[in-house]
Amino acid sequence: MSVRVLDAGLDRGAFLGLADVEAFISWLVTNLPSLQVHLKVRSSAFVPGGIDAQVTGIEAVQACYRWNGDWATVSQLLSIYRENIRAAVRSGNQDATYLACVDILEWGNVPRSAGYLAGLRQQGLLVQYLQNIAPLLSPVGNQKLCDLTRASIPRFNSGLTKVHALLDEAGSPIYDGRVGAAIAMLYHLYRRSPAAAGEAQHSIFAWGPGYESPGAGRRRTIRNPRLLALGYDGTPQLLSHTSPHIWARRQVILGWIMHAVLDRSGLFSAEGVDVAGRCHAFEASLFMLGYDLRCLVPDGWLIPDPVRTLRAS
């Protein structure tokens, strides 16, 4: 069922009308405000001093946001990057668009995608490339999931998701490994609850691997729900080379879900009335949860670091 849903010709209304999706959204609206979380992030260049905080509720998680600055600092910076890339694309300026993309990639510490974008710039195709993909990723568009094909989405990864998300004006989420891990874990928690309805569709979400780098060492984090050894099976790993369009479909799906949750709740109202701003805060919260999924499990930090990274089937 889950693979068919991900590959089906569903538009936003049809997807949100699925019994399982509707129940998941209702579960999120009810449970996110009281979510019990123990965030632990080791000190790094992006999180100086680290984090060790026990908080209640998704908004309290967002208040702990750190990525080379707190949320107030980073959100202001991202507002500038959004303005820059949108202005550059509107003007049709290939060079300005490329430089705006590079700023975003460097902020996200994912510079490798710059080479792909540089090639498009050299061919004079970068602006058109971004314009073609923009309506396919919009969380308020009329597209169907099947419109996102390998031909229309030839490349997608943790760098390009940031570029496309910041170009979007309706709050399309950055769907990187952390964000994917977090929403997948929340879906597992929902499926274990009495609220679960219909058939489980775990493959509509996917996780990406990650490490923390404390000093000279590298500690594996848990972003694959399966590694919690609690029976949370079925969530695949994000694959950029073989199925970039599937990664992009997951970004669309998450955008649809986030909009629906915010439409039914007052979550992140402190960000203002603009739903896009609230979506960005929601995404920031998922980013923090996705550092390590042990933060969402009672006594989760008693679970040892994984010896090796398993790839879900």
Image (cartoon, helix red, strand yellow):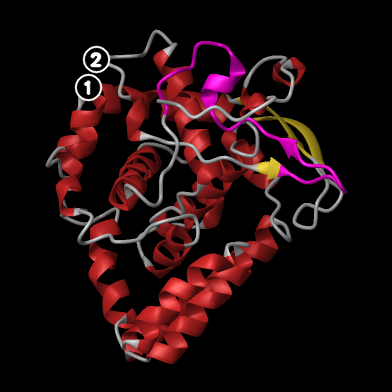
The residue identified by callout 1 is: 19
Of callouts 1 and 2, which one flags the residue occurring earlier in the amino acid sequence?
Answer: 1
Q: Could you give the CA–CA distance between mark 1 and mark 2, rounded to whole angstroms?
A: 6 Å
Decide: marks 1, 2 in contact (CB < 8 A)?
A: yes
- Taking the view exactly as shown, the residue that stands out farthest to the left is 9
Q: Quadrant of the N terminus?
A: top left
- Tell me: residue 285, above or below residue 313: below
Camera-side residue of 91 and 127: 127
The residue identified by callout 2 is: 198
Left or right of 271: which side holds 124?
Answer: left
Region rendered in magenta: 212-235
- How many C-alpha atoms fall within 10 Å of the one at disc 2: few (<14), some, or many (≥20)? few
Mark 2 residue type: Gly
Q: Secondary structure at mark 2?
A: loop
Query: Which of the 4 image quarters holds residue 94?
Result: bottom left
Query: Which of the 4 image quarters holds residue 188?
Result: top left
Mark 1 residue type: Ala
- Tell me: residue 69, above or below residue 101: above
